[in-house]
Image (cartoon, rainbow, N blue to C red):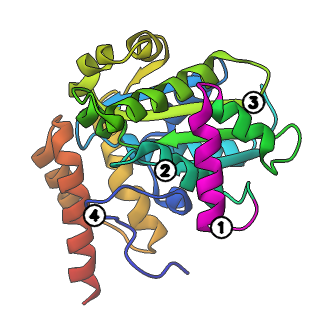
Amino acid sequence: MFEGNPFPGLRPFEFDENYLFFGREEQVTQLLQRLGNTRFLAVVGASGSGKSSLVRAGLLPELHGGTMTSTSIAWELSIMRPGGDPLTKLAQALVESNLFGDVNEENVLQTRATLSRSGLGLIEAYRQSDIEEGSNLLLLVDQFEEIFRFRQSGDKTGQEASHFIQLLLETARQTDFPIFIILTMRSDFLGDCAEFKGLAEAVNEGEYLIPRLNRKQRARAIEGPVKVGGAEISPRLKQQLLNDIGDDPDQLPILQHALMRMWDYWLN
């Protein structure tokens, strides 16, 4: 029996909440098809369009379930955000995936040093890892647009941001090791990709622009979690919610937040 609130509110859905994630089944299938043909995928959409949820709660569980049959069904996942130090964040994400022994600061520093040596640093880190032979490594760089805060910087931070991007691009170009790169990025930052050599070309080739949910899909996003929670929503309320949000993708987080609040109110 489900306990708790089936709606996440303003935050994204997480990997272990895929059973609450409804309405984007067709988009998940499209992402799986794209990933079967490329090692570099850029999931792009407006703020609040559901990029992180689509990848975290839609695509990643499907990969773990062995849905993509064009490659090994064994996957290791590393998830990060660039933040203020993308190389350290990448090293932490790799170590926290239990691919480099114990999760401690020493291993993070050693992994960061490996990443920093050359543009092939991520490939070398994969070779040094404890990943089982034949297993795929998927690196998700969520909210990739954070990297653009360094684009005008000529200091060490700006150089490390450029090196981080070269790590991703060099890794995506090679085919000797099964390493896959997925970015999520706000669409209003697409033009900023030209600030880094090779990035605009890679994004253009691997771009997946999130389409708007149609009315039927939005209805599933409302009804599905309600049913998982063991309840029902009245047709009148559902239609009112659908009418209120219309086709505006900016309203999707607000819808989730409203549903979360309504669920709490209903319980109490």
Judged by depth in the image, the label closer to the viewer, 2 or 3, is 2
Judged by depth in the image, the label closer to the viewer, 1 or 4, is 1
Is residue 85 shown to the viewer in this render? yes
Q: Amino acid at mark 1?
A: Val
Residue carrying label 4: 9
Disc nearer the start of the sequence (2/3): 2
Q: Nearer the viewer, residue 104 or 63?
A: 104
Contact (CB < 8 A) between labels 2 and 3?
Answer: no
Tell me, yes or no, whether the highlighted magenta stretch contains residue 231: no
Q: CA distance from mark 1 to mark 2?
A: 14 Å
Magenta segment range? 101-120
Q: Residues within 10 Å of mark 2 (few under 14, many from 20)?
A: many
Judged by depth in the image, the label closer to the viewer, 2 or 4, is 2
Which element is circle 1 on?
Answer: loop
Judged by depth in the image, the label closer to the viewer, 3 or 1, is 1
Q: Nearer the viewer, residue 233 or 124?
A: 124
Q: CA distance from mark 2 to mark 3?
A: 22 Å
User: Which label belongs to residue 178?
Assistant: 3
Q: CA distance from mark 3 to mark 4?
A: 35 Å
Residue farthest to the right? 133
User: Which label belongs to residue 103?
Assistant: 1
Q: Nearer the viewer, residue 185 or 17?
A: 185
Please name the predominant secondary structure of the magenta segment in the image.
Answer: helix
Q: CA distance from mark 3 to mark 1?
A: 23 Å
Q: CA distance from mark 1 to mark 4?
A: 31 Å
Q: Is residue 149 above or below residue 4?
A: above
Which element is circle 3 on?
Answer: loop
Disc nearer the start of the sequence (3/1): 1
Residue carrying label 2: 88
Q: Amino acid at mark 2?
A: Thr
